[in-house]
Structures are given as structure tokens and as C-alpha cells.
Image (cartoon, helix red, strand yellow):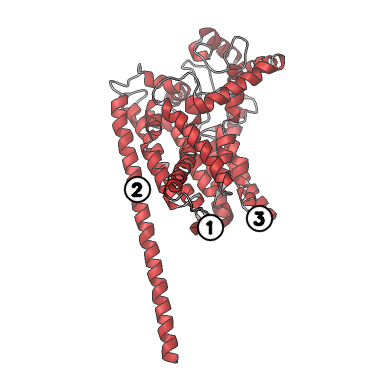
Amino acid sequence: MLISSSANATTKSGTEAEARGFEHTAHTRRRARLVTIVAIALLIRLIAMTMVQRGPLGPESELWKSGLEIVNIAAAMASHQGFSSPFGVPTGPTGWIPPVYPSIVCLIFLIAGIKTSAAAFMILTMQSIFSAMTCFPLYGVGRRIFGHQVGILAAWVQALFPYTVLMPILFIWETSLSALLLAVLCYFSLRLSSIGTISQIGVGILWGVAALTNTALLSTLSVFCCWPLLDGCKIRPSLRIWIVVSLSCFLAISPWLWRNWHSLHAAVPIRSNFGEELWIGNHAGGTGRTFFGVNPPENDRELKKYATLGEIKFVAGKQREALGFIRAHPGRFLSWTAYRAAYWWYANGESAPVFIFYRALSLISIAGIGLSLFKKNRSAILLAAAVFLFPIIYCITDVYVRYRHPIEPLMILLGTFFLIECLDLLRNPFRARTGYGSELR
């Protein structure tokens, strides 16, 4: 009997060891596959960059105008003029753009020269790396919410989708980094209740970095931080997590807030240009969104006014004018808000072939949200919140196709889920499926 018990114990131990070995092997294969996807994604973007950005990319190249404020601030910093002059002429300190991306571009200018071809190559390569690396957190979010199959296919779509391939190589802007940060924050938000306090502080600091990269990302902070409560965690632990993450985020951005108070002599909540953005979309003679000739870098009269008044007074005047227009024309404001919302999803009036992919992504991602909620996949609420909360500020102020890119990897994930479900339904029309990602919960 004793021999039999010993044999059973040995067999059980061997089975557990075998299971651990199998799990380790599967994990190694998944990691290798993800690395392959990221490498292919980067290679495709670099090849596309050589095809799209032809000719010299020196100071006169149109590329530098695609991210004018970022480029000008970075050039001022590299020229030892400080964080200033967003419109290319000396106008003093600025808070027009958050500090992270101009600082990164400044570092590249210090290495490769200001507005040189080498600097352009480094910036576009860096943006391509950000775009390719988004496959990592996107897979993690997809695997946790929908399962391995959806996660890995979404990573492939992020790698190969023409729209995401072109975005990092057409503009000098923070959109690819913002998309990467939001995907990473979404992944960690799903795990907030299972990680320690130190890790939660790290998540809060990462939120601060995200806010100083693209302030609009803060629109999703409340839902992401409250996710443990929405996911079934008790009130007291959820409140503690919310306090830890929010306080860490505030501490991360507080040096920049102090800098703005000291340099601009005003309480500036990260960015100073909200009034200008509100005016662009809401003023007499406007169209509901931006058009050429109304901004300081495009209009000498506006640039002179900006330089004379200073940034804070200039923006405050624009905000008063915009608010006055909204109060006097509430119907027009609502109409233009609806127009901007429609543009966000459909890109009204844009005729380039690439917008076929833009519109298709809108359609299948919204269908994915509807299907995931219909199937009562509670974790998909986090994705839906990000997709619908993020555009609110743009619908009120101004909208452009590039502004949507930070949430597009999450939209790709939702669309991938929807397409896989449709294909599975065609293969197995009589079999219901439930329990997405249950192996990871």
C-alpha cells in the first residue's frame, strides 16, 4: 500500500512537471511569434518609409511642416532657447505642446542636426518602432479579454494594416507613441487589482508620461483607474488603487505644471492652447473644423497678434470669442459638433484611397463593441470606454484624421474580435461560444 501511494505521488509530480514544461514551451513559442510579428511590422514600415519619403529631407522639406509646433519647439530647445517659439519666430516660453515629444525630437536634433535628412530618418524610424512595438501590448490586451487567437491576429493586423503602416511615416507627431502608451496602459489597467502598490505607482507615473505626451489620453484615466471596481473588486481596495494611481500621475506631471506657472505666469493644465482649438472649430465664418489660413503660423496677422499679446492672453481672447459664439449660436454649435463626430468616424470629404481602411476600421470596431457587450464580456467595457471617451474633446473643439490614431490599435482589436466571431459563426452556425480569455482570469 505504501509502495502504491509513493508511486501515485511520483506520477502526480511527474504530471505537474510535464504540465509546467508544456506551459513554458507554449509561452516561449508565443513570445517568439510576437517578436517575429514586431520585426515584420518594423521592416514593412521602414520599406514603406523609403517609398513614401523620397528625395532630400532637409530644412525645406514639407515633412517638417507636418509637425510644425513640435519641430519648432524642438529646434528652439536644440538652439539653447528653451521650451519656446512654437511658430518658428522668437516669441518666448510656451505651453502650446506637452513636453515629452518635443524633448525627444530635440535630442535627435542634437545628435543629427536640426532639420537634416539624418534627423528626419531617425525620427521616422523611431515612430515606426513605436508603431511596431504596439503589437506587444495589443496582444496582451486581446489575449486577456478575448483569448489567444484574437490577440495574435490583432497583432498581425496592427503590423500589416495599411493605415497603421502609413501613419508613423507621414507625420512628425506623437501619435504612434500615444497609441503605444494607451495600449500599454490598457493592459496594466486590466491587471491593476492583481499587482502590488509599487507597480501601481509605476502605472500612475506612466499615466503622467502619457499626459505629458498627449493630454487627450487623460480622458480615459477615470475609467481605467476605476476598472478594478467595475471588474468586481471591493470598494475599499478599488478606492486605494484609484488614489495611488491618480496621485502618482499628478506627482509625475507636477514639475511641468510648476514650470508653466513660473514661465507663463498662469495656471496652465499641461497645455495652454485649448482656447485656440475651441475657436478653430467654433467661430463666425468658420466651417466647424480647421482650414488653412486661420492659425498663427499660416496667418501673419494672427502671428503678430500672438507675439504682441503673449500666448496666455492670445489664447484667452480666442476662448472668449469662441464661447461667445457658442452662446449666441447654440444650434450651430450642436450642428458642428455632430459634423465633427461624423468626421471622426467617417472622414467626411476625404477622398484618398487610404480612407477606405479608415472607414472600414470604424465600422468593424463599432460592430465589435456591440457584439462583445451582447455577449456580456465585461472586460470589453474598458475598450469601449476608451473608444468613445477619447473623441469627446475633439468633437467639441476641432478634429482631424490623425487625432484618432491613439485609439486605433484598440479599434483594431475590437474589429478583429468581430471578424473572428463572424468567421466562426459561418463555420459553426449552431454552436454558441462563451468564456473569452477564461484561461487567463
- Between 257 and 423, the one lying in front of the other is 423
Q: What residue type is labelled 1?
A: Arg
Whichever of callouts 2 and 1 sits on the residue coming sooner in the sequence is 2
As drawn, the label of residue 237 is 3
Q: Where is residue 142 in the image (x, y as percent from the top left)?
A: 47, 47
Q: Position of residue 302 (x, y in %)?
A: 55, 10
Q: In this view, does 373 lie to the left or right of 72?
A: right
Q: Is residue 251 shown to the viewer in this render? A: no
Q: Which amino acid does label 2 sit on?
A: Val
Q: Where is residue 372 in the image (x, y as percent from the top left)?
A: 54, 45
Q: Determine whether 243 is above or below 298 in the image.
A: below
Comparing labels 1 and 3, the label whose residue is closer to the camera: 1
**Which residue in the structure is indicated by mark 2?**
35
Image quadrant holding the N terminus, namely: bottom left
- Between 393 and 417, the one lying in front of the other is 417
Q: What residue type is labelled 3?
A: Pro
Whichever of callouts 2 and 3 sits on the residue coming sooner in the sequence is 2
Spatial CA span between label 2 and label 1: 24 Å
Give me the residue at 38% from left, 70% from top.
Answer: 18
Element type at marker 3?
helix
As drawn, the label of residue 121 is none
Neighbours of disc 1 within 10 Å: few (<14), some (14-19), many (20+): few
Whichever of callouts 1 and 3 sits on the residue coming sooner in the sequence is 3
Q: Among all residues in the image, which is located at the extreme right?
A: 327
Determine the image quadrant of residue 273: top right
**Which residue in the structure is indicated by mark 1?**
441
